[in-house]
Amino acid sequence: MTTLKRSDPYLGKVITAFEGGIVTRIIDHPYDSSRAFAYEVTFHLRHPRVVAVAAQKPPLHFHPYQEEYIEVLEGRLAVEIEGVEHVLSPQDDEFNLRPWCNHRLYSPVTDVGELAKGYDDGWDGEKTVFLLSGQDTDEMFRLDTVFFENWYAYQDLVVVKGEKIDLLQVMSMFDAGGSYLSLPTWIPFSRTIARSLGIFLGRWIGGLLGYQPFFKKWTTDWDLACRKMETSIFHRRFSDRERAEEHRMLLGQAS
């Protein structure tokens, strides 16, 4: 599927979060050009912002439309799937996250001072580096760099600037990124209900209340963000085509 394939204004861009604690570099995937996105992600584990949240796991979530791929280049990365934790290292092959699986990614290290007791391969615990990429899809609301760029920026508001997290804002962004917060698996049809709630609350109710999934101040490819939002009657009013045209002109001048 190549619906959105075009010249990528993000290629080579570096996105930082947590005041440099997390650094994401947008790259061409080294061996599969069909991926919707490919990033080299670095967690600086001794960075104060990363240390401060080391014991907190991100929310469980799932992606109905895309498979994700993870390959650790340096250090360790924990991937929790359906309640089972897998600790990946550079010795492991690429790890696949199937659509609809409940999962989350995080560092398995909560105390860098304890590293020497757990690992004997010379890793010093300074950083974890991994490739993160995703399957392409025709869905407009999907995992891609527009989503990640806005999601990282929103996390900075909460973690760095201390703003209170807004669940509707999270659900609005997640829905636009083809992602949904997981419900307990003992609930019958939990994934279907979670996706429906994400659309109803994040897109429909959130849109009516003024929650938008993407923001001009955070978005490099505003033209693509506008096209995404224009596919939903609840988001069309957030699309600013005048700004998108200005962005295209700037890109043309730069080239």
Image (cartoon, helix red, strand yellow):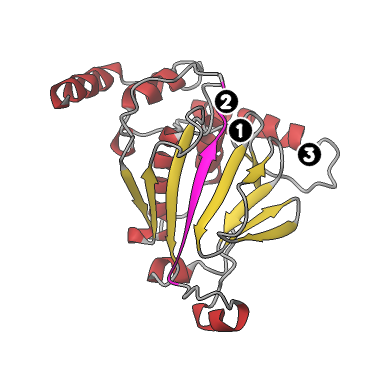
The Cα–Cα distance between marks 3 and 2, rounded to whole angstroms, is: 20 Å
Q: Which label is found at residue 190?
A: 3
Q: Which residue is mark 2?
A: 204
Residue projecting furthest to the left? 253
Residue 68 rendering spot, x and y as whole percentages: 59, 39
Crowd tier of the residue under label 2, counting other residues whose Cα lies within 10 Å: few below 14, some 14–19, many 20 or above: some
Q: Which label is found at residue 224?
A: none
Q: Which residue is mark 1?
A: 201
Whichever of callouts 3 and 1 sits on the residue coming sooner in the sequence is 3
Q: Quadrant of residue 182?
A: top right
Magenta stretch bounds: 126-137
Magenta stretch, overall SS: strand
In the image, what residue type sits under mark 1? Leu
Residue 58 seen from this side? no
Please name whichever residue, 174 or 131, is drawn nearer the observer in this view of the structure: 131
Tell me which residue sits at (69%, 59%) in the image: 86
- Front: mark 3 or 1: 3
The number of discs equals 3
Residue 133 rendering spot, x and y as whole percentages: 52, 40
Label 1's element? helix
Label 2's element? helix
Whichever of callouts 3 and 2 sits on the residue coming sooner in the sequence is 3
Pick the quarter of the image with the N terminus. Answer: top right
Q: Is residue 87 above or below residue 52?
A: above
Image check: 230 left or right of 202?
left
Crowd tier of the residue under label 1, counting other residues whose Cα lies within 10 Å: few below 14, some 14–19, many 20 or above: some
